Amino acid sequence: MKGNAIKYDKDNIDTDVILPGTYLKLHDYDELAKHAMEGLDPDFHSKVKDGDYIVAGRNFGCGSSREHAPIALSYSGIKAVLALSFARIFYRNAVDGAFLLPIEIDEDAYKSISNGDQLEISVEKNTIKNLTKNKDYKMKPFSELIGKIIVAGGLFKYKP
Amino acid sequence: MPQTLFEKIWDSHVVVESDNSPSIIYIDRHLVHEVTSPQAFEELRLNKRRVRRPDLTIATMDHNVPTSDRSLPIVDQISEVQIKTLEKNCQDFGIQLFDIKSPYQGIVHVIGPQLGITLPGTTIVCGDSHTSTHGAFGALAFGIGTSEVEHVLATQTIRMEKPKPFEIKVVGKRKNPHAITAKDIILSIIRHIGTNGGTGTVIEYRGEAISDLTMEQRMTICNMSIEAGSRAGLVAPDEKTFDYLRGRKFTPKNYDDLVSQWQETLYTDSNASFAKIFTIDVSNIAPQVSWGTNPAMVCDVTESVPFPEEYAKGNEDQRKAAEKALQYMSLKAGTKMTEIEIDRVFIGSCTNSRIEDLIEASKVIKGKNVSSKVRAMVVPGSQMVKKQAEEMGLDKIFKDANFEWRESGCSMCLGMNPGILAPGERCASTSNRNFEGRQGTGGRTHLVSPVMAAAAAIKGHFVDVREMDLN
């Protein structure tokens, strides 16, 4: 899985900036995608490319339980969010609907990755390769439940 | 083995659990609203599934409903579609709905306890992060996303990894309990433990300062557990809890038997251990006001807007965050909090829209007028709260002071219905989130208690409400 990093050097990126409340009325996922990250980065929609990754600090996705947040990112083309930590509801929403991978990274990886770096992620090996900087990072492995839901392709496809 | 209250509730709801597989937890009550449910119902239809327990599922509309005149049609057609969709879904799947015309309509976390749907020792979920509110009754209650809503509708269970118990001990006696409110206690807690201090845990609020609180005040505390990262927060039930729920619309018929059972089981064993402990003494806390863009960026009303370096205590990320927050909030470090002028006041939301909140706020404004520079509104949490307040004449006090007196709903808490801030407007708000754009693009939110909001409405800037006569 290869893509470019869109980096926000910021903690506490909340669901209200990921998908502002006014768009919670929309049902069309492609329409939601047009407003992804609008509260933080109004240019996001014009610059994001299919397969990109978001890189951010601690407590990504804090706030509301709106699944519209990972949906908007997913339909923008974001395949994974790499963050120092995640708020739990966002984390589960991302995985349950198979919208994107919430990947926990460490401080070294966070500091090292720059905006625009090309990354290659291997969930099987728990590794992230920075192809631009020729560096390897570890990602925190998924817990058993989360790993199984991811492999199955979402909560409803997971059969224990 | 000694257990915490949370662990007891968890264990009594486990459907399947083994050492190396995640748990399946039974859900006793599922609350549904218009915003996070449409996709879940749509998927049920596509997969030809039914709602497993419509009798344990209850719906209302709160996020998206206008809080202006209800006799008028809804102007926003997209909103109307969302509201109509919930009506149809409830009809098709046999779910009880308190719609926009119902005397029981209101914010889902306000009506749950008011109707006696929220009960001690139960598991409660809702597609809303502030479901933690119901923990005030000793329930394990947490917010879920739409996929999980669908899962609960279809199976009445949820798959979950077990969170860890977190004890927050709240000690001391508040000197002026009318001025220093539950909101000030929870804002102080979040200020200390941070927005992710509770991540992965269920908080149990304990101690004399919690026992002292009324049920509605405990709801304010549990409501904001999610702002500290905890999906759930709870308080062990006591006589106040049992009294509050007695004789309500859905209170079970064998209530006294249930109370006896709860008294025997619903408490944390004396030598149970918590994964994390935090203690706070509230005997000397001041009214709290948020200055930044998350609910941990809070200070005393007697303080000044902090300098980013001072706030960060050497942490570079925190310094940058504070700088950015001040820029967004258009505040200069060193400005006295009491010198910050406001444009709007919002008294409402699932945090602070209950009858006691309105009573306390009305004491501040009685016989006074809202500053000519301020537009202020009161949005009761439910039609039941509104009715009770009107019977007490509170509506008159608010209206006489030039407050708008609205219909019930989430209103200006989340910027999705017509109640929003204009860009650049500054609001003293009794809600729960001061995120950028939360109450409308470019809007600036300061989180405060209802009495602090009321005082700010009159003066046009923040004031230390302890200086006002609240008795």
Image: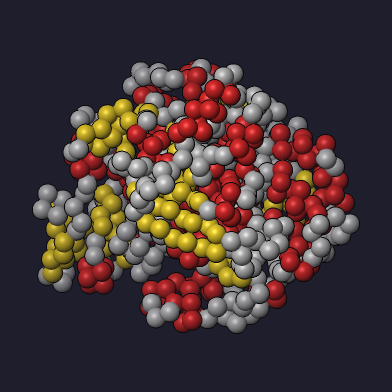
Instruction: Please give the name of the residue rendered at 51% of the width and 70% of the height, measured from the top-left corner.
Output: B325
The answer to whether B261 appears left or right of A159 in the picture is: right
Q: Measured from the top left, where is residue A37 in percent x and y?
A: 42, 57
The answer to whether A45 appears left or right of A140 in the picture is: right
Instruction: Please give the name of the residue rendered at 47% of the width and 61% of the height, measured from the top-left corner.
Output: B279
Residue B313 versus residue B100: which sits nearer the camera? Answer: B313
Q: How many numbered marks, from 0 up?
A: 0
The answer to whether B69 appears left or right of A104 in the picture is: right
Query: Which quadrant is home to the N terminus of chain B?
Result: top left
Colouring scheme applied when the structure was drawn? secondary structure
Q: Measured from the top left, where is residue A85 in percent x and y?
A: 32, 59
Tell me, yes or no, if residue B31 can be seen here: no
Residue B140 versus residue B271: which sits nearer the camera? Answer: B271
Q: Is residue B252 above or below residue B134?
A: above
Residue A103 versus residue B12: which sits nearer the camera? Answer: B12
Q: Is residue B45 above or below residue B291?
A: above
Tell me, yes or no, if residue B331 can be seen here: yes
Q: Is residue B18 above or below residue B250?
A: below
Q: Measured from the top left, where is residue B446 in percent x and y?
A: 61, 63
Which quadrant of the structure image shows residue B388? top right
Query: Which quadrant is home to the C terminus of chain B?
Result: bottom right
Q: Measured from the top left, where is residue B112 in percent x and y?
A: 58, 33
Instruction: Please give the name of the residue rendered at 41% of the width and 33% of the height, measured from the top-left corner.
Output: B149
The answer to whether A3 appears left or right of B291 in the picture is: left
Instruction: Please give the name of the residue rendered at 21% of the width and 49% of the height, measured from the top-left corner.
Output: A142
